[in-house]
Image (cartoon, rainbow, N blue to C red):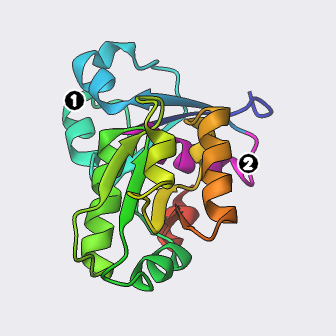
Amino acid sequence: DESSKLTIGVIDCNPEARHMMADKIAENHDFDIFEYGLETVLSFPERVPEDLSLIFTTTTHANILNETLPPSVKVNPLALSPTAETISAIAKLRSDEKIALIAYSHEFIGIMLRTIHSFGDPSSKPVVYHFGTSASFNKLLSGKNQVDAVILPANYERFSSKAEQETIHQFEKSGGKVILFEYQMDHGSSLLI
């Protein structure tokens, strides 16, 4: 028992943040990490294995999970915020630049949008694109309606096709700004883990 691995459950409403949390937790530890969607857990709490050693979620969802899951399950909230590099890159965008927000989930688009409004000054509404939903991706990053900058999750390769990745690389190569939106854990959350 002393040498067995801990099994960690990571729960959040969007896969981008779940993967970022799981990656951060796994950086310095050899854990078995399982990811669960928030809606699935709320709808079917019995599907969360009882033998998980620890469960982590964001501070946003900790209360509702504690109300939903059995009292024997301890949910550990992690405080996440955009990295200084992400905030700085967003703050440096000019108000007249056309911005595209690209992600897999609608929830992560919302997180990026709130961050833009907190730290940036866009004069026009950003264009929104979801990976894997349309063939118009090339038009978004080229042609007369081209955007000046794209903001996408730091782990976007997990959610995008090779063609979408190549389009992003070509966009950046041709002078377009690519801002990788990345989360960090506060010091207290790192100590908790």
- In the rendered view, tell whether residue 40 sits above or below residue 33: above
Give the CA distance from mark 2 to mark 1: 28 Å
Q: Where is residue 166 in the image (x, y as percent from the top left)?
A: 68, 44
Identify the residue at horizontal 42%, vertical 81% (top origin): 93
Q: Position of residue 127 (x, y in %)?
A: 31, 54
- In the rendered view, tell whether residue 171 sits above or below residue 18: below
Residue 29: which numbered mark, if any? 2
Residue that carries the numbered disc 1 in the rendered image:
68
Please tell me how crowded label 1 is: few (under 14), some (14-19), or many (20+) other residues with Cα within 10 Å. Answer: some
The reply to whether callout 2 and callout 1 are in contact (CB within 8 Å) is no
Q: What stretch is highlighted in magenta?
A: 11-30
Q: Nearer the viewer, residue 75 or 149?
A: 149
Q: Which of marks 2 and 1 is nearer the N terminus?
A: 2
At mark 2, the secondary structure is loop
Q: Is residue 27 magenta?
A: yes
Please tell me how crowded label 2 is: few (under 14), some (14-19), or many (20+) other residues with Cα within 10 Å. Answer: few
Q: Left or right: where does residue 29 sit relative to residue 87?
A: right
